[in-house]
Amino acid sequence: MMKKILILCTTFICILSGCRKTDSVQNTEQKTGYKQVSMEEGLELMKKDSGYILLDVRRTDEFEEGHIPKAINIPNESIRTEEIAQLPDKNQTIYVYCRSGNRSKQASQKLVDLGYTNVIEFGGIIDYSGEIEKGRQ
């Protein structure tokens, strides 16, 4: 009898766990307020999009060593609680990346906290295989 109850409980837990899993992008957005996609997905979205901002949140020296073309640089450490002059439209789509994905997540959350409504975090430049620009923006 105890074995049947254990099997039943395990099955029930597995079913509940499976039912709770939905689209990971949607779950991330619900928890954080921003969308999180892979580098590949982000690049595909940008191909279909226009009027967006591509935001590199690495340090200035890292940005100058090489960045995705058309990116602007606002280091994560400089995003605080004040308005950001380079990002005047809080409804504009902003694609955010860094080196590995850690700082871009932090920066994306800070942007959402500042009232930006369409933030898409897509990881780090280490996963990018396209053309690289060097120098300042």
Image (cartoon, rainbow, N blue to C red):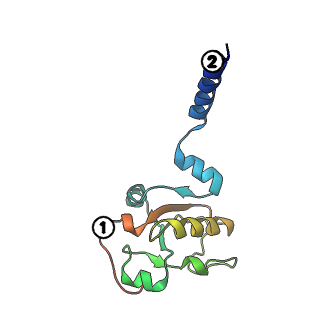
Question: In this image, 22 relative to 81: left or right?
Answer: left
**Disc 1 versus disc 2: distance between alpha carbons?**
56 Å
Work out whether mark 1 precedes mark 2 in sequence or the reverse, and give the earlier one: 2
Placement of the N terminus among the 4 image quadrants:
top right
Secondary structure found at label 2: helix
The residue depicted at 59 percent of the width and 68 percent of the height is 106
Q: Residue at x 61, y 36 (%)?
A: 20
Q: Is residue 27 above or below residue 58?
A: above
The residue shown at (58%, 29%) is 14
**Where is residue 26 drawn, in percent x and y?**
57, 47
Q: Quadrant of residue 48?
A: bottom left
Q: In front: 130, or 14?
A: 14
Badge 2 crowding class, 10 Å Cα cut-off, few under 14, some 14 to 19, many 20 or more, is: few
| SS state under label 1 | loop
| In this rendering, position of residue 11 left or right of residue 45 | right
Q: Which mark is residue 130?
A: 1
- The x and y percentages for residue 88 are 60, 75
Q: Nearer the viewer, residue 90 or 65?
A: 65
As rendered, which of 5 and 52 lies closer to the eye? 5
How packed is label 1: few (under 14 Cα within 10 Å), some, or many (20 or more)? few
Residue pictured at 34% horizontal, 83% vertical: 134
Vertical order, 76 against 7 (above or below): below
Extreme-front residue of the structure: 2
Mark 1 vs mark 2: give the one in front. Answer: 2
Image-based side of 135 in relation to 89, left or right:
left
The quadrant holding residue 131 is bottom left
Q: Amino acid at mark 1?
A: Gly
- Dot 1 and dot 2 residues touching (CB under 8 Å): no
Residue assigned mark 2 = 3
Count every numbered label the image shows and give the total. Answer: 2
